């Protein structure tokens, strides 16, 4: 996982522009990610209306089962519903992962 979900959730509690999301499968955590708006995006991109996808991780037992692809297919519409002002979705990549 790129960021341990509990650590990412703690960061979300300190920064109200970070919004954590969990996708459950049979009541088990399958996918975790944070959507970040506002100033946090600006360290990666100059579009103040962008949403940053960060701390994206898939639980090991769910890897290779299509969860990532399906989640990413649905993400654009999900972001438009949750953040109607968003004009762009960007991804932060951990180069060491």
Image (tube, rainbow, N blue to C red):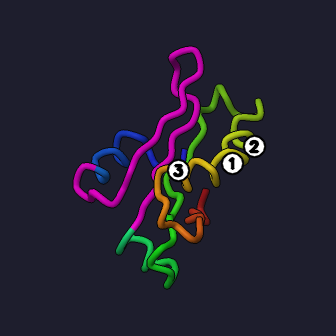
Span highlighted in magenta in the image: 13-37
The residue located at (51%, 40%) in the rendering is 32
Mainly helix, strand or loop, the magenta region? strand
In the rendered structure, the answer to whether residue 47 lies left or right of residue 61 reads: left
Question: Is 80 included in the stretch rendered in magenta?
Answer: no
- The x and y percentages for residue 27 are 51, 16
Q: Are marks 2 and 1 in contact (CB under 8 Å)?
A: yes
Q: Quadrant of residue 43?
A: bottom left
Badge 1 marks a residue whose secondary structure is helix
Q: Which residue is mark 3?
A: 81
Numbered circle sitting on residue 69: 2
Residue placed most toward the observer, 16 or 58? 16
Q: Quadrant of residue 93?
A: bottom right
Q: Which residue is mark 1?
A: 72
Residue placed most toward the observer, 76 or 54? 76
- The x and y percentages for residue 14 are 22, 55
């Amino acid at each position: 996982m790129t960021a341990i979900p509990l650590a990412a959730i703690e960061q979300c509690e300190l920064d109200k522009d970070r919004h954590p999301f969990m996708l459950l499968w049979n009541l088990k955590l399958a996918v975790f990610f944070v959507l970040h708006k506002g100033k946090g995006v600006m360290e990666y991109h100059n579009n103040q209306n962008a949403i940053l996808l960060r701390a994206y991780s898939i639980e090991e037992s769910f890897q290779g089962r299509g969860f990532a692809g399906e989640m990413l297919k649905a993400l654009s519409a999900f972001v438009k519903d949750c953040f109607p002002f968003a004009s762009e979705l960007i991804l932060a990549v951990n180069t060491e992962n």
